[in-house]
Amino acid sequence: MHRIRFIAQKEFYHILRDFRSLIIVIIMPVMMIFLYGYAINMDIENVSLAIVDFDHSVESQQLTERFFASPYFSPGENEVDMSDPEQLLRSGQVAAILAIPPGFSAALARGEDFELGMMVDGTDASLASAVQAFSNSVLSNFLMDRLPPNFDIPGVTLSQQVLYNPDLKSSHFLVPGLVAVILMMISALMTSMTIAREKETGTMEQLLTTPVKPREILIGKLLPYVVIAFVDGILVLIFARLVFGVPFVGSQLLLLGFGLIYVTTALSIGILISSLVDTLQEATLLAQVATLLPAVMLSGFIFALKNMPFVLQAISYIVPARYFVVIIRGIMLKGAGLEVLIPQAGALVLLMVILMTVAAAKFKTRVV
Amino acid sequence: MPYLVADSLSRKYGHNLALDDFSLSVNKGELFALLGPDGAGKTTMIRVLCRLLDPDSGSVTINGLDLQQRYDDIKPILGYMPQQFSLYPDLSVEENMTFYAGMYGVTGQAYRDKRDQLYQFSKLGPFAKRRASALSGGMKQKLALSCALIHNPRMLILDEPTTGVDPLSRRQFWETLLQLKSQGVTILVSTPYMDEVARCDRAAFIFGGRKLAEDRPAQLAAAFQGSIFYIDREPTSQLLNQIMSIDGLTTARFGAGMHLYLAPDDSLDPYLNALSQLGLNSSDINPIAPSLEDRFIQLMESPT
Amino acid sequence: MNDSTHNSGSAVLINNLTRHFGDFTAVDHISLKVDYGEIFGFLGANGAGKTTAIRMLCGLLMPSGGSGEVAGYDIYKQAESIKKHIGYMSQKFSLYPDLTGRENLTFYGAAYNLRPADLSDRIHELTERLELGEFINQLSGKLPIGWRQRLALAAAILHRPRILFLDEPTGGVDPVFRRRFWSILYDLADSGVAVFVTTHYMDEAEYCGRISIMHHGSIIEQGRPFDLKRQHGTDSLDDLFINLILSQEATRA
C-alpha cells in the first residue's frame, strides 16, 4: 500500500508544477458554469404580447391585466387587424397574440371547458416554448385564484418544473444540473491524461518494470485528483449560489459528501479511458466524447429521461451524472435527505468500483 | 554460469520479423553488449527480456526463474534503463530517486544510505533539488542509471544508454558500468556504436532481428576475412578507378585517404608493382587492423 | 554531377570569430578555412560551442566579433545571400512523416522557389543519384532510417547549395548504409560542394577529410584524422578526443 502513497505524492507534484494546467482546471469549470448558465437560461422577460379581447367582460379584462402585471409579458400592439392577425407576428411587432373569444366569462361562471386561442412566433423555439409555458402558468394562476382551494380544474396539469420552481426561474432548475455535467466532464478529462502522458513520455516503460501493481498505479493517480475535483465542485457550487441565486434548501454537508463520491466516480471514467488508450490525443478526445454528450443528453439535466426511448434510458443508467442530477436537485431545491438519496449514492459507488476494476483489468503491462 | 538465458525468441510486427529465432546467454557477472544499428531489433529484444513485450515464441529465464511465470520474483533483482529518458522531468533529482525507491519498497534509512552511495558515483548530490528537465545529457543519464540501481539489482539491462551523449560522458558512463561489473552485477547493454564494445566481455552482432555473430570483441573483429590497408593519398575518383581496375583489389574512399581490401590468403606483394605505376609506394600503403564495423559489414553482406 | 560552379575563393573563411552571451563566451576567436570539395568534420562535446558557430556561419546569429565569409558572402551583411547557397540536414528527421518522399521534396522545392519544371527534373535526378527508387513514393515516416536519411539529404541539396551543413548525419544507421551514405557525400564533394559535418561521434569523424576539435569555444586541434592519430600516437580518434579534452581541463584547473 505504501506504493500508492508514493504514486499519489508524485502525481501531486505533477499537478502543482504544471501551473498553467492547474489554473485551467480551476478556472474552466467556473467559466463554463457562467457561460452555459446564461446561455441556456430559458427565462423570459417583457415579451411583447397582443391580447385581442372579443369577450369584453370584467373577467377578460382581469385576465389581460394579470398577463401584463407579470414580468414576463408587456403589452404590444392592441389594434389587431383580424383579417390578417399574423401580420403582427410576421413583422415581429409582437411575439405572441392571445385571443379571448366571446363566452369566456360565461364559461368561467358555469365552470365549463373553454379554449383560448394563442399564436406564438416560433422562430425562436426556446422562446416560443417558454412563452407557452409561462402563459399557461399565468392562466392557471388566474383560474386557481378564482376558485376555492382544493378545487380541481379540469384539463389543467402542472408540470414538475413549476411545482419545484415556483418563481419559474429556469436557472434554479438548470444550474444544479449544469454543475453535475461540468464536474463529470472536467473530472474525466483530468484523469484521462495521466496514464497516456506517461506512455507518451516513456516513463511508463520504467514504471512497469518495478514491482508496482496496476491497481496501485490507478488508485495512486486517482487520489490527488479527487482533491482537485472536489475543490472544483465547491467553487462551482459557490458560484452557482452567488451568481445565479440558486436556492439551497437542504444540507450542505450532505451535498459535499455526495459530491465527493460523484467526482470520484467521474474521475474513474478518466482512469478507465487512460488505461485503454496510448496517446494524449486519444485520451482527451475519448474523455470528451464519453462525458459531454451523455452528461448533457442522458442525465435528465435538460431532457426528461422518462420520455426517452428504452435504449437511451437503459444507457443512462451508466451515466454517473444521471444520479448526481437527482442528488443535487434534491438537496438544493427540495431539501431531500440521506434516506431518499441513498439509492443514487449506492449506484455511484457501484459504478466507481466497476470502472476502476475494469481499468485495472485492461491496464496494459506491455508496451506496444 | 548463465544468469540470463533467452531461448529462440521470435517476435513479429505485422509482416516484419523484429526478432528471428534469437538466442542469448549472459553469464553471471558478465558485461555483455548487443551491438547493432537502429531498427536491428535491439529494443525489441531488450523489451522482451524485461517482459515489456511478449515474444511470439521462445522463452527467457533470469537467475533460473522463468520470466513469464516468475516475473514478480524477477522484478526486485532486475534494473532496467530504457532508451528514451524515462524519468519525470518535472520532478527533482531527489524526488525521482525517492519515487523509484518507493516503488521497490526501499524507504527510510535503507533509502538514504543507497541514495548517498549513488550520489558518490553520480556527483548529483549538489543538484538534488534541480528538476530533471534542467539537467545536461550526461547528468540525465547518470540519474536514470541511479534510479535503475536504487534497489540493488543483480542484473542490469540498458537500452542504448549512451545515445546522444558526448564522448567524455560516454567514457565516464562505461567506467561506471565496469565498476558495477566488478561488484558482481550482470549487465546487458545495447548500443549502435562499435567503439563501445571493446570494453565488454562479450558482444553479439544483431541485424534484421537475427544474431550474426557472438564472441569476445577482439575475436569478433579479428574474424574479418581478408586484410585492409590505408592508402595515404588524395582520393581522386581517377585514382580510385585505376586501383579498382587492378584485378583482385577493391578500394573505397575513406576520409582523406583510401581503404584497400584484400581477399583472405592474398597478400599485397603481387600488387606492389601495379600500384607503384600509379605512384603509390609501399610506404604510402599501411596495414590497418580490421574494425568491428568492417566485420559487421562483411557479415551483413554474406552472413556465414 | 556538376552541382555548383567552382569558386576561386573558399567555401568558409572565418577569422577570430567570437560570440558572447552576456558574460559567457560561447565561441572564442575561432579561425577556419574550408575549401569547396572538402569534407570537414567539426567536432566537440555538447556545449563546446559547435551549434553557436554553425548558426553564425548559416547567417542565423550575429557574431560579437571577428570576420567571416561563407560562399563568398559576408556573414554580417549578406546573411540572406548565404542562406540561398547553403543546405542543412539536421540529425532530427526534418521531413513530414505523413507525406511521401516526393511530396516532401516538392514542398521543399517550392519553399526554395524552384520552378515546377526544374523541380520535377531535379527530383528525378536526385532519385536516381541517391538510389531512392520506389521509396520516393512511400510515406516518409514509414521508411527505414537509412532511407529517411537519404531523403533528408535530397531535401537539403534540392536547391544545389554550394555548402552543405550536416548534423550527425549517420548516427545509428547501419554500417552498410553509412558507408553508402558517405560515398554519396564523397561524390557531392567531388562535384565541388563543401560538406561541413558537425558530430560528436568519432566513428563519423573518421570519414571526414579534415577535422577540427572544439572545446570551451576554442578550436584546440585541427588536421587530417590519419595525421592526427599518428601525431598523438593513438589509433582511435575517441582516445585522441578524450585525451585532448582532459589535458585542456587539466591546464584550465
Image (spheres, rainbow, N blue to C red):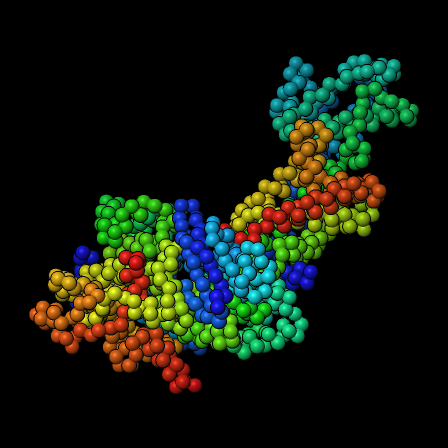
B256 lies left or right of B299: left
Which residue is the extreme one toward the front? B1
Q: Examine the rendered structure and indicate whether residue C147 appears above or below residue C49.
A: above
Lateral position of residue A367 relative to residue A245, left or right:
left
Give coordinates of residue A342: x percent, y percent. 80, 43
Most foreground residue, A268 or C220: A268
- Front residue of this view, candidates A87 and A261: A261
Q: Nearer the viewer, residue A16 or C85?
A: A16
Compare residues A276 and A39 and report the one nearer the observer.
A276
Residue appearing at x 69%, y 19% in the figure:
A80
Q: Is residue A204 visible?
A: no
Query: Which residue is found at the position 33% from the left and 62% from the top?
Result: C170
Q: Report which quarter residue A87 is drawn in.
A: top right
Quadrant (top left/top right/bottom left/bottom right) for the C terminus of chain B:
bottom left
How many numbered badges does the structure rendering display? 0
| Residue drawn 24% across the image and 56% down it | C160
